[in-house]
Image (tube, coloured by chain):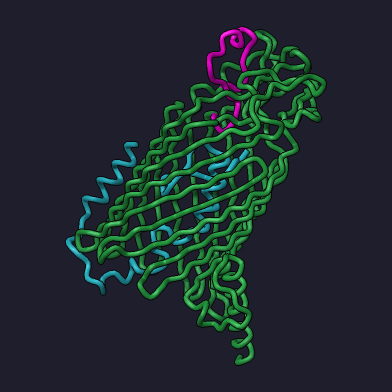
Amino acid sequence: MQLNHSTNKNIRKLLKTATGCLLGASCVANADENSLSGWETDIAILSYTETDRVSAIEPTINTKKTFDDDSILGIKLVVDSLTGASPNGATPSNNVQTFTRPSGKGSYQTASGETPLDDTFQDTRISLSGSYQHDINRMDKLIWGANVSNEFDFFSTGGSLSYLHDFNHRLNTLSLGLSMEYDVITPQGGSPIALAQMQATTSTQPKLNDTENKVLGELVIGLTHIINRETIAQFNYGYAQSSGYHNDPYKVTSVVDNLTGESIVGDSLSGTYLYDSRPDSRNRHSFYSQLKHAFGADSAEVSYRYMFDDWGINSHTIELSYQKNFDDWYIQPSLRYYTQSAANFYRHSITETDAANIGDYLSSDYRLAEMWSTTIGIKVGFKTPDGNKNSIRLAYYYQDGNTSPSDAIGIQKDYELFPTLDAVIVQYTYSF
Amino acid sequence: MRLFFLMVLVCLSGCSASLTPWERDILARSDMALDNAPLDSAFNDHIYFSKEASSGGRGFSGGGCGCN
């Protein structure tokens, strides 16, 4: 036992030193444990796998240190690696469909009757974020945050400041948070001209700029309320305003025949596919409520979120979980249900007649469609002999939408016009 | 939306006058923290941000992600 304890202690010390070094904390070869004591670290890895579509691996290190003055410094590093295929927005056809890759230097084909997927989706994202929380006085505190992330075609940087005020004998906490985010988008092959036709590789691609950008500002006002000895609640109102480039440069909309529903011949491709076009601003409002209650040694949580925006989307999200605690371990089943209405410029496809009078905006991105999703999960947490925490989480995500809309035409009635998806999520977390 | 305000009403109607420090033992349990698994929440936010049109609510909604 003595040997095991010593070994565990050494492993802990090594991990703490390695984490500190990796995240830029003091790194001295002979650093004793005291120099890194007080650091609490979580190491996690997430595996996300969609059936026949995207898969992702996301290792994460999150560490924080509480100082003598109760201030807390937090640092988080995430590496996100994705591969697989993603729907490009076009509808299925009775014929083989050919699409030009975003670079304009190659093409891919979709078999008849299949949902068109761009199978070249591949990216690695690195994200670094930090936060610093400190007291202003006995009842007030500030939390500063900053983050930067980079991937192949996207760079993002941002900052936030939150003010927290305890009152009413500390039964309530009022919070006010502001954040800003600046994104630079560099679509592969350049950003397509909105509503322009995708062209064959032999033709000039309708591309506008090499880079685009977007700015996001947010306000979150929250109230935490202790109801009684076993129950606590939280309410948030959030307002987010973004301006700039909101299009998905890799999505297109099919133009189909008025009667047959078959894709019509394009300028240089066998089908006509129009690039995504969205408003250059979006305003969102969200209302979030959460209730947590202890049932003896166990606890349960319920939350509800309502969101609406000026694109015509409104959504409802309900989450439930129950944690059954045992001496050295716990089990936590959870359930999430989400539903949203479509953006007012979403179309699964447009007819030739409609194409003559599209308007300014058009998108076939399934994420802007009417849809609903369910996540069923289970998490098991336990402690290692040295007292460190472990948890394993397994979840199944299923997303569905209006696969047979009433405005489907001709052959479209034979196909699913919403690309349903299911995914398995596995996460392991080790805390020391 | 109505569900949100219903939850607000129900929760605020159950006000307690005060809780002494020794009566906060249950609320001090790690599983009673409002976000007792921030990494899980962050992973979930990232997944849902990239698959659905809504994000945020519990906190800020920005994703810092292209998420195609």
Camera-side residue of A309 and B12: A309
Tell me which corner region of the image, top left, top right, bottom left or bottom right, holds residue B30.
Answer: bottom left
Colour chosen for chain B: cyan
Q: Residue at x 56, y 81 (%)?
A: A386
Position of residue A124 measured from the top left corner of the image (x, y, whole percent): 68, 49
User: How many numbered discs, if any?
Assistant: 0
Which chain is green in the rendering? A
Q: In the shown orientation, is residue A59 left or right of residue A103?
A: left
Q: Is residue A324 left or right of residue A48?
A: left
One can see residue A53 in this view: yes
Residue A227 visible in the displayed image = no
As drawn, the residue found furthest toward the bottom would be: A2
Residue A398 location (% of width, % of height): 59, 42
Residue A371 magenta-highlighted: no
Q: Which residues are magenta?
A: A347-368
- Image quarter of the N terminus of chain A: bottom right
